[in-house]
Image (tube, grey):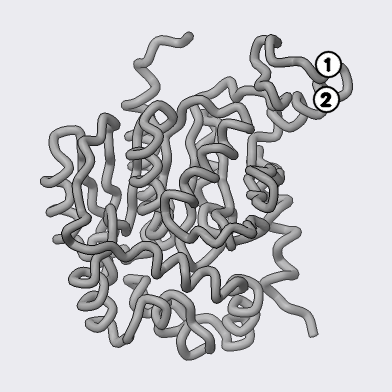
């Protein structure tokens, strides 16, 4: 029987190619590979260079030691959340950001990204992402993170400040503690974060959609079943990723982020509520700004993509439009 979610992937991939990005796999280290959606031009240049330039090409201007062409535009990295792989999450943003070089990774255990390492910490996820971006020729970037991807973005900004020059975060906090995540999950009618974020049935997926969206979303059961089959692989490893996010209260410190941070929030987010975002803004300090989007929940970039994209582009313009070109 045809899986409708799997069947639509070629169409989505075709649309993304029209928008200027194509998939590419990067070996991070032996046993670890990550899939990235990357600007088409960088792949064409790299393939051409691979056939015309000797192996020792580190001295070539605009080319990394691995042969990857460096992007010529400011780089924006879009990092997905826990319910879907990268390009499905950001399908409504890629085509709106043509002024920028867009990179969309699949984090480890999502999409085509896997590792044989037993490390499930956010730090390891971030180290692999940073290494992959550098192999693709990225030297500096703005990271846009949603939900789990927002937590990854915060950790990446902390560990690699020379790589991350700004952050845009939606529906995410810097770190999860039991006194935050347990009451939040319980208030939504779930026992654990895995019960919420890793549904095993159509009923469970409907419950996740209900708490994630401001508007009531309806999909036929057959489509939801197909979505579960395609998007919820690597369940054991993803459950371990969730466990790796929880830290003790005594281990929580707020880094002195040198980057500008923009919190772009659905005002009706039931998972990480508006008040939590506003409190986080105050703790992060004067370099942090906040914008709320009305009539939008946790899935703010999917529910109100036009408004989200407009606010995102305004922030990116404030970063790059007045910056002198090198």
Residue 117 horizontal/vertical position (percent): 59, 58
Taking depth in this image into account, of 262 and 129 the one nearest to the observer is 129
Asked if 228 appears above or below 238 in the picture, the reply is below
Q: Position of residue 5 (x, y in %)?
A: 67, 72
Measuring from the top left, give residue 27's x and y in whole percent: 69, 44
Residue 148 seen: yes
Residue occupying image coordinates x 39% and y 79%: 196
Residue 236: percent from left, percent from top: 55, 75
Q: Residue at x 67, y 57 (%)?
A: 112
Q: Residue furthest right?
A: 51
Q: 319 left or right of 254?
A: right
Residue annotated with mark 1 = 53
Q: Within the image, what quadrant is residue 67 found in?
A: top right
Numbered mark located on residue 50 in the image:
2
Is 182 drawn above or below residue 322 in the view shown?
below
Left or right position of 55 against 302: right
User: Are dots 1 and 2 in contact, CB under 8 Å?
Assistant: yes
Secondary structure beneath label 2: helix
């Amino acid at each position: 029987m045809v899986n409708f979610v799997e069947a639509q992937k070629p169409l989505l991939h075709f649309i993304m190619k029209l928008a200027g990005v194509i998939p590419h796999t990067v070996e991070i280290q032996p046993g670890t590979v990550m899939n990235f959606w990357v600007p088409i031009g960088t792949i064409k240049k790299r393939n051409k260079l691979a056939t015309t330039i000797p192996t020792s090409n580190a001295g070539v201007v605009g080319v990394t030691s691995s042969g990857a062409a460096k992007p010529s535009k400011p780089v924006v990295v879009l990092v997905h959340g826990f319910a879907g792989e990268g390009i499905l999450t950001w399908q409504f943003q890629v085509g709106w950001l043509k002024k920028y070089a867009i990179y969309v990774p699949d984090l480890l255990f999502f999409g085509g990204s896997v590792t044989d390492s037993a490390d499930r910490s956010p730090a390891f996820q971030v180290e692999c992402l940073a290494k992959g971006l550098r192999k693709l020729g990225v030297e500096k970037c703005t990271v846009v993170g949603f939900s789990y991807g927002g937590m990854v973005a915060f950790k990446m900004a902390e560990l690699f400040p020379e790589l991350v020059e700004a952050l845009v975060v939606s529906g995410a906090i810097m770190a999860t503690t039991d006194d935050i995540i347990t009451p939040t999950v319980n208030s939504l009618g779930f026992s654990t974060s895995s019960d919420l974020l890793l549904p095993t049935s159509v009923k469970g997926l409907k419950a996740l959609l209900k708490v994630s969206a401001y508007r009531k979303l309806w999909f036929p059961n057959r489509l939801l079943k197909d979505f579960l089959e395609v998007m919820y692989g690597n369940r054991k490893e993803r459950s371990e990723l969730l466990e790796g996010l929880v830290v003790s209260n005594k281990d929580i410190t707020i880094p002195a982020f040198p980057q500008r941070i923009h919190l772009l929030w659905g005002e009706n987010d039931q998972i990480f509520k508006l008040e939590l975002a506003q409190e986080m803004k105050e703790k992060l300090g004067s370099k942090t700004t906040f914008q709320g989007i009305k009539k939008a929940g946790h899935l703010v970039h999917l529910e109100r993509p036009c408004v989200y994209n407009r606010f995102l582009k305004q922030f990116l313009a404030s970063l790059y439009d007045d910056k002198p070109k090198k």
